[in-house]
Image (cartoon, rainbow, N blue to C red):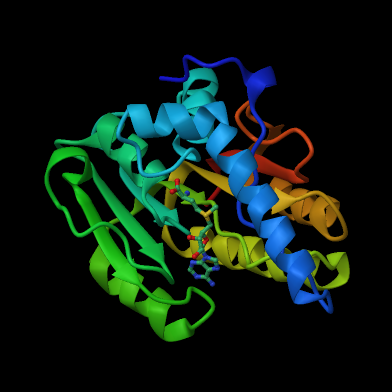
Amino acid sequence: MAKIRARDAVFCLRPFCVVFAHPVSHTKSSARWLARHHADPYVREARAQGLPSRSAFKLEEIQQHDRILRPGMTVVDLGAAPGGWSQVAATHVVPNGRVFALDILPMPKATEGPFRGVECIQGDFREPSVSEQLLTKLGGRCVDLLLSDMAPNLCGIPAVDQPRSMQLAELADEFAQQVLNRGASLLVKVFQGEGCDAFLGQLKHHFGTVTVRKPKSSRPESREVYLLAKRFLL
Ligand SMILES: C[S@@+](CC[C@H](N)C(=O)[O-])C[C@H]1O[C@@H](n2cnc3c(N)ncnc32)[C@H](O)[C@@H]1O
């Protein structure tokens, strides 16, 4: 899917908000972010291929390397909007498999075309009632692969951003332990920093292998990496 060269990639997941900054600086940084965004080859390629986000390339790269998606699988996609990963996952698992996508933000309404086999829930995964809703939707199905690309709204202050992102990763792991099939996998985004190594160690207690993935389509200067935990031990 990715025809572009990784070294050409320059992107930002979302604009950093400038805390205590003068409004003029904020406007300038937003303009800079927009300029970078539009020049980003992955953004252009995503548009050309009709993908909802450039993030799709990250999952596709991991898929090409690790073959985590297979036909017929039940997949949960946390932090799914605007739908790039769900679309990639659906391509690999339908017609017999399903993708259960969850995000605070709305997902595309379509249930046909590239979103065939994708069921969506809108809500904050930190709310127990929302994870309950997801469990209900799963209807007792065991999950073969749990994806989490959840990321908090970054404010640029590591002491605030890092615990927020680790909390989302921890919640994804807790949910994984409730729903994964024996031998299933978890792919979870974390930001390198405090708590990351401890989290990796924690995953090693209930998965056979844990590896770190940094797809070429992930901005090199971003602290974002993906932990791929395979062979869930029940
Ligand atoms: C990097 S984006 C995901 C991109 C997506 N994987 C794709 O391919 O289009 C991170 C997402 O995490 C979501 N998110 C952040 N905190 C969340 C939470 N507490 N519950 C649910 N979703 C959350 C955001 O709304 C955002 O859409």
What residue lies at 80% left-to-right and 64% top-to-bottom?
156
What residue lies at 32% left-to-right and 77% top-to-bottom?
133
Residue 110 placed where, x, y %?
16, 53
The answer to whether 60 is drawn above or below residue 51 in the figure is above
Position of the N terminus by quadrant: top left
Residue 122 placed where, x, y %?
34, 72
Query: In front: 78, or 53?
Result: 53
Residue 20 placed where, x, y %?
84, 79
Residue 56 placed where, x, y %?
44, 36
Q: Quadrant of residue 35?
A: top right
Q: Quadrant of residue 161?
A: bottom right
200 left or right of 175 in image: right
What residue lies at 79% left-to-right and 50% top-to-bottom?
201
Q: Is residue 87 visible?
A: yes
Q: Quadrant of residue 50?
A: top left
Query: In front: 26, or 191?
Result: 26
39 left or right of 219 in image: left
